[in-house]
Amino acid sequence: MKDQDNHMHKTIGILGGGQLGKMLFYETSKMGIPTILMDKNREMPVGKIAQEYELGDFENYEDVIRFGSKVDVITIEIEKINVAALEELANMGKKVYPQPKIISLIQDKGLQKSYYKDNELPTSQFGLYDNQADLINDINNGRWSYPFVQKIRKGGYDGRGVQIIKSEKQLVTEGFKKDFLVEDRVEILKEISIITCSDTSGTTLSYDPVEMVFDPNSNILMYQLGPADITEEQKANAKDIAYKLTQELGIVGLLAIEMFIDINGQILINEIAPRPHNSGHHSIEACYCSQYENHIRAIYDLPLGSTQTIMPSLLINVLGIEGKTGPVKYEGINECLKTPGLTLHLYGKKITKPNRKMGHITIIGKNIEALKENYKLISSTFKATS
Ligand code: ADP
């Protein structure tokens, strides 16, 4: 974009008022970009801070058209959007990023997997099914052996809609019955994520890979480490895969690519998200230009900022504790805020539920061992309870 074409008066419309929308909104506010958001109710995290907020259902065609007609550039913080409406808005001349066809691809895990295969991108073996009888047939013919992974094609999130099937009995009683996919169970050494950002001319930058670190006993996610503790060769391979996929899609804005490194060191794509992502929260404090700012720059036709890491980081999700549902109370805030290099992000959700994402904590610092010590202290003292 040339400076004389300055268009900083154009309005951005963000579909979704959750925490990701809130963080996008901070960036548009910072740059003075007019912004309207839409979500179902004002209780969503952005509801209380955005002046221009529309109530509407982003899965409803008319609501999305009504909202999109009022703005110049449309983006999303969630994939569950009415794509037909986005296509219509694009036909009307609105800038819609990510592009609607990419959103429909990503809404369906079956299409996603087929896309990787068609484009020779590494992913685990898989099969698509519309009923369980066909799967049982394939198992009997030796195509699959237990344990394998079964996933619903549409609508799953945060592990809901994914299960490991260990026996025929489990498959018949608990298995998904229709429109699912089956994947080889990968023997995972590490789970990593790379976020890329692409502008309207096709320039792509990528953040350093980050790593999800799980408790070896309970297998529960403990924290995210950025950059990932992997070899330089693995980093380079993961980045190559991320670039290839991003360029192939031709996406404008962010793309989060979740990958597995298996026990043989092979890198496999698990799934992707065409929007700001939980695995990029750390970029607010740990990188020169955050994923949120870069997404806004990309969709608003501004030059991208540096994705380089300034400082290692450890990120902890603040989840509602088990057994507590109701108005949220935070315990251990004072202790937590005494930690040097720590930033507390609370999303402003009034009600806590088990495992609900209530906020996150980023700690930056040069010494990774010290970051891990901080994790131990915070995870034992800071709680979202009721
Ligand atoms: P969601 O979209 O709900 O996050 P994912 O497809 O990312 O679902 O799966 C959730 C988790 O399940 C992953 O983070 C990983 O730990 C595990 N998982 C998913 N697919 C496989 C697989 N093919 N083999 C082994 N584990 C898997």
Image: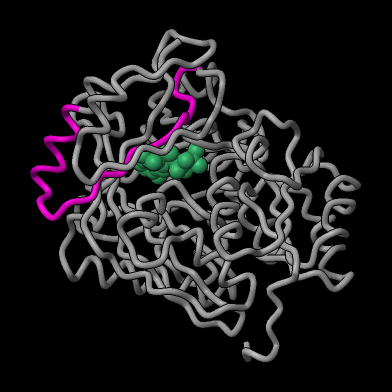
Q: Which residues are magenta?
A: 353-377
Number of numbered callouts drawn:
0
Residue 9: percent from the left, percent from the top?
Answer: 74, 71
Membership of 366 in magenta stretch: yes
- Is residue 137 or residue 275 the one in the foreground? 275
* In the displayed structure image, the side of residue 380 where residue 101 appears, left or right: right
Residue 172: percent from the left, percent from the top?
Answer: 54, 20
Query: Which quadrant holds the N terminus?
Result: bottom right
Q: Residue at x 38, y 30 (%)?
A: 318
Above or below: residue 161 compared with residue 60: above
- Is residue 113 or residue 350 the one in the foreground? 350
Membership of 97 in magenta stretch: no
Query: Which quadrant holds the C terminus?
Result: top left
Residue 322: percent from the left, percent from the top?
Answer: 40, 13
Above or below: residue 174 compared with residue 134: above
Q: Tell which quarter ligand 1 is in.
A: top left
Residue 139: percent from the left, percent from the top?
Answer: 47, 36
Q: Residue at x 85, y 73 (%)?
A: 93
Task: Say which quarter of the image contains residue 349.
Answer: top right
Q: Residue at x 41, y 14 (%)?
A: 385
* In the displayed structure image, the side of residue 229 where residue 97 appears, left or right: right
Above or below: residue 382 compared with residue 313: above
* In the displayed structure image, the side of residue 356 where residue 41 appears, left or right: right
Q: Residue at x 41, y 23 (%)?
A: 167
- Can residue 160 be spotted in the picture? yes
